[in-house]
Image (spheres, rainbow, N blue to C red):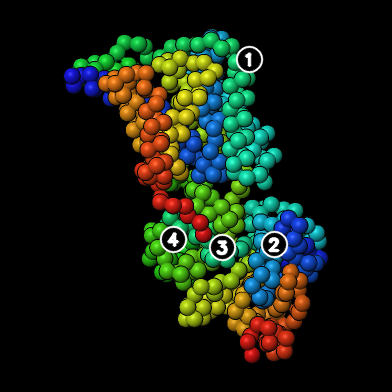
Amino acid sequence: MLLGIKELDCHYGRIQALHGIDMAVDEGELVALVGANGAGKTTLLRTISGIEPASGGSITLDGHDITHYSSDKRVRLGIIQVPEGRQMFAPMTVEDNLMIGGYTRSGDERSETLEQVFAMFPVLKERRHNAAGTLSGGQQQMLAISRALMARPRLLLLDEPSMGLSPLLVDEVFATIQKLRDAGTTIFLVEQNAYMALAIADRGYVMEAGAIVLADSGERLIVNDRVKEAYLGL
Amino acid sequence: MFAEFLQFLFSGITVGAIYALVGLGFTIIYNASHIINFAQGEFVMLGAMSAVFFVSVGMPMPVAMLLAIIITIFIGLALVKLAIEPARNASIVTLIIITIGASIFLRGAAQVLWGRNFHSLAPISGNDPIMIGGAAVLPQSLWILGSAMLIVMALRYFFDRTLIGKAIVASAHNPLAARLAGINARFVLLLSFGLSAMLGAVAGFLIAPISLAYPSVGIMLGLKGFCAAVLGGLGNPMGAVLGGLIVGISEAMTAGYISSAYKDAVAFIIILGVLFFRPSGLFGIRGTERV
């Protein structure tokens, strides 16, 4: 088990956003988390990344307790998040965005990963000297994912990578996610686009009102009546 | 006539370069944390006063300057550790008020330690003016200009070319994404206060031979540096440099052609004008960016 979460709570002031979350991600898995807007999906990712402090329970990586580690320490351990809305360093160049992505790695590792990323997304190489803010939405999502890859993730957390993209680009993003999984990256994918996420996931979790209400394999969740009704619009 | 103008221009550029350094100090901390550090002027005072102190106990000038920088940086870092970090979750306004409190404390401590007297500091290379186009320029002015240019270039290199510098810039543009890239926000804050303290200290011991050194010397220099930063568009380093020069030159021209009694008012008239007509400053981005 790469990531283990036990009875995790998170509070915003007096409001409890996460209620006793139990979940796990194994090495090499693609695990999807689906749920409605406001269910607490982003809060869970922020807690895993150490942006929000946990108010109860534990988070482990390789069995080591990291519940109280700072966000930068978690990045060094390989928990890398692509945040919702891409969050570019908009006025900085594409290349600088990538370099900052590899901030925690050595200079050699950075240049090596940069070549891999450019090979994977040639358009980023073409536009390496342009400001990130001038890229199209789809290119920005590629840059956001690439920036995370620069940190050499052991666990890649993706928050709504399809948000705000046209259907064609959504397909492209999901193809990229599958490619990364096939290359051996462990991925925890949070999506409102439940059908597409569960279709490519090994396992899935369904979240409602800050709690996990269903956990099963991706293919079984897709045919689950409750999921169909609530998230797939079927 | 022209010689007179040149004379005012040189003295304006000299003091403007100092405002630019102070304004850069405001800008760096603002970019890293959105805090406006009103203790920036006290960094200037500490640089001047500690250089005076170390020279008075018999140290050679370069050593005294180096020690002045080290002490000011140390106090800047202590300010973060003892006053800003413990209030980390407070609002920005609270943190700004904390820096005002820190400035009053530092001024008071300097008065207790060194007394209220005015101290002079010997200029780096004498007091014999150099004549340029009929205007007398003090060698110290050239030192100030040269050092300011060197510092601005070094800072540009640091922020544009080094990974740590870029990390500070990235934190300014998008703090969340910077944290998710593994940039330690506390480290960035410390670094920005350390850098700003260094700028303040250098400005302090460079201007001391001209302005003298005393515990409240930082008040006006700090406020005018703040005017420079706002005029240039808060958060824009090159804007702060230009803003500093504009404030310094306008001040010198007013003192020369109108009356030196109005000298100190100029910076504040400029700042009022900026706030009325162009709140984002001359080179700032219009409106605030929120993603």
Query: Between marks 1 and 2, how big is the CA–CA gap?
Result: 50 Å
Residue B112, which numbered label? Answer: 1
Q: Earlier in the sequence, mark 3 or mark 4?
A: 4
Q: Provide the secondary structure element on which disc 3 rests.
A: helix
Q: Which of marks 3 and 2 is nearer the N terminus?
A: 2
**Could you tell me the amino acid type at mark 3?**
Ala
* Chain that bears disc 3: A
Q: Provide the secondary structure element on which disc 1 rests.
A: helix
In this picture, residue B279 sits left or right of residue A230: left
Query: Between marks 4 and 1, how big is the CA–CA gap?
Result: 52 Å
> Are the residues flagged by discs 1 and 2 from a single subunit?
no
The 10 Å Cα crowd at callout 1, few under 14, some 14 to 19, many 20 or more, is few
Please report the residue visible at 43 percent of the width from the left and 39 percent of the height from the top: B230
Task: Please give the residue where the numbered disc 2 appears in the rendered image.
Answer: A48
CB-based contact (under 8 Å), mark 1 and mark 2 = no
Q: Earlier in the sequence, mark 4 or mark 2?
A: 2
Q: Nearer the viewer, mark 4 or mark 1?
A: 1
Task: Please give the residue where the numbered disc 4 appears in the rendered image.
Answer: A132
**Could you tell me the amino acid type at mark 1?**
Val
Q: Provide the secondary structure element on which disc 2 rests.
A: helix
Residue A148, which numbered label? Answer: 3
Q: In which quarter of the image is residue B75?
A: top right
Q: Position of residue B25 (x, y in %)?
A: 48, 35
Q: Which residue lies furthest to the front in this view?
A: B276
In this picture, residue B181 sits left or right of residue B61: right
Query: Between marks 1 and 3, how big is the CA–CA gap?
Result: 53 Å
> Are the residues flagged by discs 4 and 2 from a single subunit?
yes
Please report the residue visible at 81 percent of the width from the left and 61 percent of the height from the top: A57
For residue B91, above or below residue B124: below
Q: Can residue B156 be seen in this view?
A: no
